[in-house]
Image (spheres, rainbow, N blue to C red):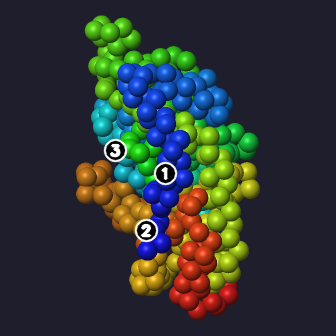
């Protein structure tokens, strides 16, 4: 089977170095919020171009804690995408606020700023644009909306470490940003992890307190916090991966270019569109077709893994039935749920494997050009 993501190949490539780092942590006796976490926070802040980075337990905690630190809660509304992983909306609900959805741009799959503005009410406190699949949302427009309506913008950059928008890195494009280090992410570890980036020193201080049970001095608590800290071992692993992330993202982009050259002309199949002012790092490589089910069956028959991202939009999830949304409310997002599918994309894909994927897709569409 040609895997959608091949973590075994990825981590085998850095196994010796990772094991040395793990042994160093083991011998140090410092396992929680130690020097490796500090080093990782410092290097990520420098790389992204912000003043502060706060490492936490996972990407979902990052979103929840940011909302909490901003004082967003019951009675407030936060606008986000209906076409994303559940955590983007779940975090809003977890702090007691109400997720409000707006439709996406059918080309980039990211939040449509025009639809976002129509969803703003007097209860709206923030916007969470998701850099879906590794391509940044239209942040200039999002920030302009925020300024106009006195809102906060929180980047959900969990799928976009290394992406850029108009020359600036994802994670530095708004008031604050959240990343995930889940193993399948471009920058991932062997377990869970996350980080928050910002140039708001006051917000960063609140977040550091929140991640540690609401305390900045042991056993003295002035707020209700969380137990959400990145383990020292994961920080050590991530430092190894961080040294290679630009190279690995470049390999993803090369594979994406090859897919585009070979598949873009096929009738009935659409390749991802990339805006000229953005750098896409292809956390996932998603194609679009009305013949999706046929494609998935043919790929499976040829021992090629694939995936559907995402099979049901968030506004149609059972848990959000009480919000009153119905099928047809967000047609662009709903069409993506019906037609989009991912094919293998990772830095350690072999060229012959990609060629097999391409030839299988050409077979599915009869090689017929548009």
Q: Is residue 83 left or right of residue 324?
A: right
What element does badge 1 sit on?
Answer: helix
Residue 266 in the image, given as x and y percentages of width and height: 64, 83
Residue 90: image tag: 3
Mark 3 → mark 2, Cα distance in angstroms: 22 Å
Identify the disc placed on residue 307.
Answer: 2
Q: Which residue is mark 1?
A: 11
Are the residues flagged by discs 3 and 1 in contact, CB closer than 8 Å?
A: no
Give how far apart the Cα atoms at labels 2 and 1 are: 22 Å
Q: Position of residue 328 (x, y in %)?
A: 40, 66
**Sequence-wise first label, 2 or 1:** 1
Q: What residue lies at 56% left-to-right and 89% top-to-bottom?
A: 363
How many discs appear? Answer: 3
Task: Please tell me in which quadrant of the rendered image residue 269 appears.
Answer: bottom right
Label located before the other in sequence (3 or 1): 1
Q: Residues within 10 Å of mark 3 (few under 14, many from 20)?
A: many
Question: In the image, residue 215 lies at what x, y percent?
Answer: 34, 13
Q: Residues within 10 Å of mark 1 (few under 14, many from 20)?
A: some
Label 3 vs label 1: CA separation? 30 Å
Identity of the residue drawn at 38% across and 42% down: 192
Where does the N terminus fall, quadrant-wise? Answer: bottom left
């Amino acid at each position: 089977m040609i895997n959608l993501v091949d973590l075994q190949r990825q981590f085998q490539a850095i196994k010796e170095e990772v094991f040395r780092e793990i042994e160093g942590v083991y011998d140090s006796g410092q396992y929680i919020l130690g020097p490796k976490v500090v080093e990782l926070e410092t290097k990520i802040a420098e790389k992204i171009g912000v003043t502060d980075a706060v490492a936490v337990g996972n990407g979902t905690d990052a979103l929840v804690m940011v909302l909490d630190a901003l004082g967003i809660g019951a009675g407030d509304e936060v606008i986000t995408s209906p076409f994303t992983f559940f955590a983007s909306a779940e975090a809003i609900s977890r702090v007691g606020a109400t997720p409000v959805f707006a439709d996406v741009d059918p080309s980039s799959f990211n939040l449509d700023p025009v639809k976002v503005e129509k969803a703003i009410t007097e209860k709206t406190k923030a916007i969470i644009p998701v850099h879906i699949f590794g391509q940044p949302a239209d942040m200039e427009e999002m920030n302009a909306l925020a300024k106009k309506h006195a809102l906060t913008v929180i980047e959900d950059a969990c799928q976009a470490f290394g992406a850029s928008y108009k020359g600036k890195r994802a994670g530095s494009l708004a008031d604050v940003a959240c990343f995930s280090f889940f193993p399948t992410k471009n920058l991932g570890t062997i377990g869970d992890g996350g980080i928050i980036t910002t140039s708001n020193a006051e917000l960063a201080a609140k977040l550091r307190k929140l991640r540690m049970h609401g305390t900045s001095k042991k056993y003295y608590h002035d707020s209700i916090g969380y137990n959400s800290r990145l383990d020292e071992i994961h920080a050590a692993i991530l430092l190894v991966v961080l040294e290679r992330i630009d190279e690995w993202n470049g390999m993803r982009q090369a594979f994406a270019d090859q897919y585009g050259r070979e598949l873009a002309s096929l009738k009935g199949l659409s390749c991802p569109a990339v805006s000229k002012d953005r750098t896409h790092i292809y956390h996932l490589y998603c194609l679009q077709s009305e013949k999706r089910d046929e494609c998935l069956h043919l790929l499976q028959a040829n021992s090629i893994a694939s995936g559907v991202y995402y099979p049901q939009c968030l506004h149609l999830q059972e848990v959000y039935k009480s919000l009153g949304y119905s099928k047809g409310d967000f047609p662009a997002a709903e069409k993506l749920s019906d037609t989009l599918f991912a094919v293998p994309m990772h830095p350690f894909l072999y060229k012959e494997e990609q060629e097999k994927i391409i030839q299988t897709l050409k077979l599915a569409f009869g090689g017929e050009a548009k």
